[in-house]
């Protein structure tokens, strides 16, 4: 590798072997010859390129940083949209200005990338949710970048930006408007009144979903959420899915002339009814940092892509979340679903009984399908929860959809943080008695064995990608989010059992399942939640 790198420069994976120990980056003349090949190396994955920009995994060097910038420029906007948080964090290590230059270039080449970068940079200016404590490492460089990107917007691009940012600021600000009102009827009325004053007169989209145009607002949907101190609220939007490139084209076309063409006219589009049109509910939060949720769901989306690539029949639902400024965010709701807590309030029996009354008795095909959906999703979420150590798994954070899938929401506690002072008394993942009941009631049952088998297959499917997962988390460590307490990466790496063969890794995962099976600590946590918050279990 050191003596003839040109022989392997067509293999992207060989690059990290060349620079892994950092020796080649020491300024020796013979090394610089080898290093110059890096500039023309075959493009690596976006994650590897991003990790070359941060100093935590590889030493930064002008040549490797220039290579990473070239690679990232070559990817289309819809790929880069998945890595916005890490791209912004790379500014912390940008001693040479290459990353700042890249961000300005990307923002100039895609409006939707520019919007997402601006929201994320605004979010990271401060360390706290109230915008009082500046982040000393990035406040100035990010402020400069925000001003640069906005000043280079002109014409239709500038109008599109103004329309998008002002309309969603108006909607997010409703949270502040309704906060002084007492919870209950008064707050609900204030919420309806405030939403009624928001009008859609041009093309915009939900910040959380740059793939769908907002056509209309359900003005009767404004609902304040259960929260004592803060005032999050929910609203429903009629959206039309069209993809990133099409949304960008329509967004610009809508603002180009004095009158938009019919395919970019909100009044014409609002009347359209086709299979791409649906209603999407979203929660607007103020005073809550959703960056941790963004990271969890980003990793979930990558896991889902891996499962699809290997055609493994398990299911994750990475709903969309985006932070738009410090302590503000938009969270899309999981469609056609209710929390286990809501089901508990409506009925006095367990989840298995709910399945029987909803989908039919043991012999019906509908129950078999719902059970299979439950098992497929349970397996995927169990592996996800174990790897990321997702905690606070009470019944308010677990949803069941209309087809019987389980969906986990709210990732405020993960990695090294857990409720009650990080005591970590919840198990690796939640496997309660009622969940086991749906899967046959005992470990020997065929349904439970299918669940265990899918867990092991899902775990083995993600293990080859452990470096990518670790790289994405490493790039976020400097945000000092509460889930990072010093040993995150070391513990995360250990959970992938990196030194085990497949057979031993499978045994390790089976042991995790056994430990969680009817774990008494899960039950204790639900009882604690009931005492504190009256969330039934």
Image: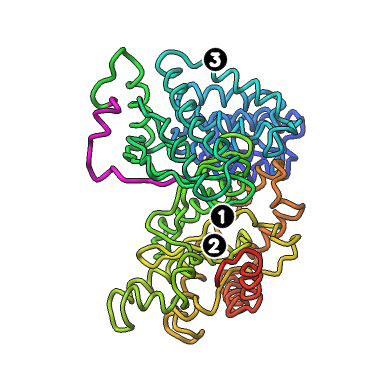
Q: Nearer the viewer, residue 429 or 346?
A: 346
| Picture quadrant of residue 336 | bottom left
Percent from the top left, x then y, of residue 198?
42, 31
Mark 1 or 2 closer to N-term? Answer: 2
Which residue corresponds to mark 3?
151
Q: Indicate the quadrant where residue 130 lies.
A: top right
The residue identified by callout 2 is 396
> Label 3, label 2: how many angstroms apart (C-alpha)?
44 Å
Please tell me how crowded label 1 is: few (under 14), some (14-19), or many (20+) other residues with Cα within 10 Å: some
- The residue identified by callout 1 is 410
Q: Which residues are magenta?
A: 264-282
What is the crowding at mark 2: few (fewer than 14 residues within 10 Å), some, or many (at least 20)?
Answer: many
Looking at the picture, how far across and down is residue 317, in whole percent?
A: 44, 56
Q: Nearer the viewer, mark 3 or mark 2?
A: 2
Looking at the rendered image, the quarter that the C terminus falls into is: bottom right
Counting the numbered discs, the total is 3
Q: Residue 277: say if magenta.
A: yes
Viewer-closest of 86 and 345: 345
Q: Relative to 7, is 348 on the left or the right?
A: left
**Mark 3 Cα-neighbour bin, 10 Å: few <14, some 14–19, many ≥20:** few
Residue 15 belongs to the span the image colors magenta:
no
In terms of secondary structure, where does tag 3 sit?
helix
Question: Residue at point 62% right, 24% down?
Answer: 100
Q: Indicate whether 79 appears above or below 142.
A: below
At horizontal 65% and vertical 34% (from top left) the residue drawn is 124
């Amino acid at each position: 590798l050191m003596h003839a790198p040109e022989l392997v420069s067509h293999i992207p994976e060989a690059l990290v072997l060349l620079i892994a120990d950092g020796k080649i980056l020491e300024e020796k003349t013979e090394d610089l010859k080898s290093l110059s090949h890096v500039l023309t190396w075959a493009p690596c994955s976006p994650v590897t390129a991003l990790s070359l920009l941060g100093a935590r995994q590889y030493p930064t060097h002008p040549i490797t940083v220039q290579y990473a910038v070239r690679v990232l420029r070559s990817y289309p906007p819809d790929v880069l949209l998945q890595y916005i948080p890490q791209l912004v964090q790379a500014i912390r290590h940008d001693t040479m200005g290459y990353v700042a230059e890249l961000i300005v270039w990307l923002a100039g080449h895609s409006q939707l990338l520019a919007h997402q970068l601006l929201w994320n940079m605004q979010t990271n200016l401060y360390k706290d949710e109230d915008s009082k404590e500046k982040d000393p490492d990035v406040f100035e460089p990010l402020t400069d970048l925000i001003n640069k990107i906005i000043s280079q917007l002109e014409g239709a691009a500038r109008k599109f930006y103004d329309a998008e940012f002002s309309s969603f600021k108006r909607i997010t600000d409703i949270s502040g408007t309704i906060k002084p009102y007492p919870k209950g009827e008064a707050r609900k009325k204030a919420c309806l009144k405030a939403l009624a004053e928001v009008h859609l007169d041009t093309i915009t989209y939900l910040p959380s979903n740059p793939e769908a145009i907002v056509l209309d607002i359900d003005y009767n949907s404004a609902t304040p959420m259960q929260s004592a101190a803060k005032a999050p609220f929910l609203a429903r939007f009629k959206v039309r899915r069209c993809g990133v490139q099409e949304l960008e084209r329509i967004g610009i076309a809508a603002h180009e002339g004095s009158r938009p063409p019919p395919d970019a006219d909100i009044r014409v589009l609002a009347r359209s009814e086709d299979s791409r049109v649906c209603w999407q509910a979203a929660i607007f939060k103020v005073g809550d940092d959703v960056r941790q949720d963004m990271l969890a769901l980003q990793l979930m989306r990558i896991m889902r892509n891996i499962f699809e690539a290997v055609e493994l029949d398990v299911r994750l639902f990475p709903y969309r979340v985006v932070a738009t400024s410090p302590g503000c965010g938009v969270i899309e709701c999981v469609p056609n679903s209710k929390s286990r807590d809501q089901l508990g309030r409506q009925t006095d029996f367990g989840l298995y009984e709910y399945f029987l009354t909803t989908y039919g008795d043991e012999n019906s095909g509908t129950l078999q399908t719902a059970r299979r959906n439950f098992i497929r999703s349970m397996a995927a979420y169990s592996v996800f929860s174990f790897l990321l150590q997702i905690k606070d798994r009470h019944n308010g954070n677990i949803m069941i959809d209309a087809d019987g899938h389980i969906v986990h929401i709210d990732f405020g506690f993960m990695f090294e943080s857990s409720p009650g002072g990080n005591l970590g008394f919840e198990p690796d993942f939640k496997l309660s008695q009622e969940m086991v009941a749906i899967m046959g009631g005992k470990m020997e049952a065929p349904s439970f064995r299918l669940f265990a088998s899918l867990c092991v297959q899902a775990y083995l499917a993600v293990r080859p990608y452990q470096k990518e997962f670790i790289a994405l988390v490493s790039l976020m460590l400097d945000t000092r989010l509460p889930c990072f307490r010093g040993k995150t990466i070391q513990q995360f790496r250990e959970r992938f059992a990196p030194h085990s063969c497949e057979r031993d890794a499978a045994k390790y995962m089976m042991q995790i399942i056994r430990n969680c099976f009817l774990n008494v600590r899960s039950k204790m946590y639900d009882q604690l939640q009931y005492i504190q918050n009256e969330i039934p279990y």
